[in-house]
Image: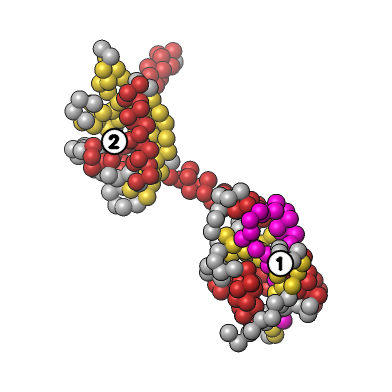
């Protein structure tokens, strides 16, 4: 029995290298080195796998570098030069295209070795992190998207509007706030599933008939918002929205009937010498929205920053 135990321990030690190789393969993790005098590369098999290359084929560094996404290539080459010059290292997440043209994510780590004051070798590890990146992207999408409609949520809207007010987004000229008229009545008369269907249909219509919008978001409940490009000016946007309300206000098919739909819209301009805070901009559009509801619903009103009041434009529906 004692001999069997000792033999088992020795067997475990002898197989540790093989276990390490298995773990590296499972993690998509491989080692590499580059002779800086000749630029010749040496890879373990796992790195070949990351790039989709047959193991053991001759490697040409310039051809490998061409497999990097241009943004990652520029970052990698800059970090590489810094590491070689200073004898330090770096880690980065890089996008590459494998031999089949598939976009992959790779975590690259590198360390430069100097001898006699001169750089001689660059070595490190490469790991396929594509699945981790895809998972993070799905989680990010889930955090930033409204679950019912798939539109961006309030957080994304507020961040985009804030960026515009700070001058980081100069392509946004108008803010529109929309909601369904009588949404509670729809829920009470047809049920909450029907109400959800109305919200989904409205989101689809907004996306389809406002392809130029910089952002269409659901803020919650039956409230939606759009950030519209500049130009045209806000008055022209009022006319455009007014004409497209014909589509937005079409009834929604539901079981053996149709659910009447009416959308009211409030609009304000972001094109002015001094923009107020985002909350004040939203309040302007919101006040225009409630004026639209008071004017008969299913229409659009705009806030005039020069007059400091809401006006109801004369809309030519035939244009």
Most distant residue in the bottom direction? 318
Does the magenta portion include 278? yes
Residue 286 percent location from the top left of the image: 75, 64
Does residue 193 appear to the left or right of 131 in the view shown? Answer: right
Q: Name which quarter of the figure residue 290 lies in.
A: bottom right
Residue 286 in sight here: no
- Label 1: which secondary element: strand
Residue 55 percent location from the top left of the image: 24, 39
**Depicted 30 relative to depicted 14: above or below:** below
**Depicted 306 relative to depicted 24: above or below:** below
Does the magenta portion include 269? yes
Residue range in magenta is 260-284
Quadrant including the C terminus: bottom right
Nearer to us of marks 1 and 2 is 1
Does residue 236 appear to the left or right of 185 in the view shown? Answer: left
Residue that carries the numbered disc 1 in the rendered image: 304
Q: Which disc is residue 191 wearing? A: none
Q: Would you call the spot at circle 2 few (<14 residues within 10 Å), some (14-19), or many (20 or more)?
A: some
> Which sits in the foreground, 278 or 198?
278
Q: Residue at x 48, y 48 (%)?
A: 134
Q: Would you call the spot at circle 1 few (<14 residues within 10 Å), some (14-19), or many (20 or more)?
A: some
Residue 167 in sight here: yes
Q: Residue at x 21, y 31 (%)?
A: 40
Does residue 184 appear to the left or right of 176 in the view shown? Answer: right
Residue 2 percent location from the top left of the image: 44, 13
- Label 2: which secondary element: helix
* Sequence-first tag of 1 and 2: 2
**Depicted 8 relative to depicted 63: above or below:** above
Question: Colour scheme used in the picture?
Answer: secondary structure
Q: Which disc is residue 45 wearing? A: 2
Quadrant including the N terminus: top left
């Amino acid at each position: 029995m004692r001999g069997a135990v000792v033999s088992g321990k020795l067997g475990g030690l002898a197989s540790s290298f093989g276990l390490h190789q298995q773990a590296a393969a499972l993690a998509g993790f491989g080692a590499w080195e580059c002779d800086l005098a000749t630029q010749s590369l040496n890879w373990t098999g796992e790195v070949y796998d990351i790039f989709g290359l047959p193991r053991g084929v001759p490697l040409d560094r310039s051809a490998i570098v061409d497999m990097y996404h241009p943004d990652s290539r520029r970052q990698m080459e800059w970090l590489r030069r810094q590491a070689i010059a200073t004898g330090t290292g770096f880690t980065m997440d890089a996008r590459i295209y494998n031999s089949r043209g598939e976009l992959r994510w790779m975590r690259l780590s590198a360390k430069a070795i100097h001898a006699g004051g001169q750089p001689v070798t660059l070595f490190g590890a490469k790991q396929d992190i594509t699945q981790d990146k895809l998972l993070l992207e799905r989680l990010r999408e889930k955090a930033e998207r409204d679950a019912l409609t798939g539109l961006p949520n309030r957080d994304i809207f507020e961040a985009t509007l804030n960026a515009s007010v700070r001058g980081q987004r100069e392509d946004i000229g108008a803010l529109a706030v929309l909601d369904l008229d009588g949404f509670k009545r729809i829920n009470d008369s047809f049920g909450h599933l029907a109400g959800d269907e109305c919200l989904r249909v409205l989101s689809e219509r907004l996306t389809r008939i406002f392809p130029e919008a910089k952002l269409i978001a659901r803020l919650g409940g039956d409230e939606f918002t759009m950030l519209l490009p500049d130009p045209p000016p806000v008055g022209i946007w009022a006319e455009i929205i007014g004409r497209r309300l014909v589509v937005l206000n079409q009834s929604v098919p539901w079981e053996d009937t149709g659910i009447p739909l009416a959308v009211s819209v409030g609009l304000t301009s972001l094109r002015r010498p001094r923009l107020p805070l985002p909350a004040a901009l939203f309040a302007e559009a919101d006040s225009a929205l409630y004026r639209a509801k008071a004017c008969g619903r299913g229409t659009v009103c705009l806030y005039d920053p020069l007059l400091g009041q809401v006006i109801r434009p004369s809309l030519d529906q035939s244009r």
